[in-house]
Amino acid sequence: MNNKEVIVNQVEEKTRNVVLNGGIVHANVHHHEVLDKNVFRDQKFDILVSIFCLEGACSTYDEYVKAFNNIILLIRPGGCLILGSVIEDTTYNSGITKIGNPKIFSVLYLSEKQIFNCIEATGLFDMSTIRKYSLESVMFLMVVKKGL
Ligand SMILES: C[S@@+](CC[C@H](N)C(=O)[O-])C[C@H]1O[C@@H](n2cnc3c(N)ncnc32)[C@H](O)[C@@H]1O
């Protein structure tokens, strides 16, 4: 195993433990309170990671903008959003099911510009902090929420 693989394994193991310790909870991006308020009160988080979720959950751009505005309420001021998006496509292949079929999700067709506009329109993010990484049909970005 080379150095990079060792690091990836360590990160995977650490992430797996964090997930196991924190558990998995139900979320609905269409609700103003995305997480169960009885469990999380008004808790805010340092980092919110959303990977190919919003475009899978939404069928119009209006719905996407509303859902985006819901999820970002979970980030504390100065906290960070990591957003993975399928770009200009209507399907996403998330691997293989247990019986060997491709796991295909229908997703909302979105451009990078629409996503950037959505983030900027909130007025809540420091747009100078955006870091973007694009691959074929997907984009990952990181952006910091403005402080108090
Ligand atoms: C395209 S999949 C992406 C899954 C995973 N992040 C990945 O990269 O393979 C979309 C995900 O959004 C979740 N999802 C769909 N509707 C949702 C909603 N209203 N609120 C929260 N998550 C939702 C689905 O359960 C699914 O796991």
Image: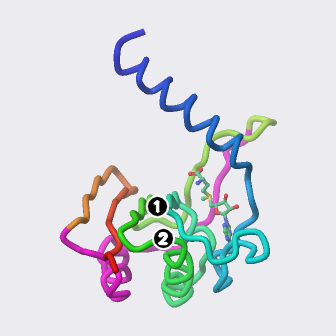
In the shown orientation, is residue 59 left or right of residue 121? right
Q: Position of residue 133 (x, y in %)?
A: 29, 53
Q: In this rendered view, identify the residue nearer to me: 77 or 2.
A: 77
Give the vertical position of 24 relative to 8 (above or below).
below
Q: Earlier in the sequence, mark 1 or mark 2?
A: 1
Give the vertical position of 125 relative to 25 (above or below).
below
Residue with the mark numbered 2: 75
Q: Position of residue 31 (x, y in %)?
A: 68, 83
Residue stretch in magenta: 101-128
Q: Based on the displayed image, in which of its 4 quarters is residue 14 positioned?
A: top right
Quadrant of picture, ligand 1: bottom right
Q: Is disc 1 in contact with disc 2, using a CB cutoff of under 8 Å?
A: yes
In the shown orientation, is residue 134 left or right of residue 46? left
Residue with the mark numbered 1: 46
Q: How crowded is mark 1: few (under 14 residues within 10 Å), some or many (20 or more)?
A: some
Q: Residue at x 48, y 85 (%)?
A: 65
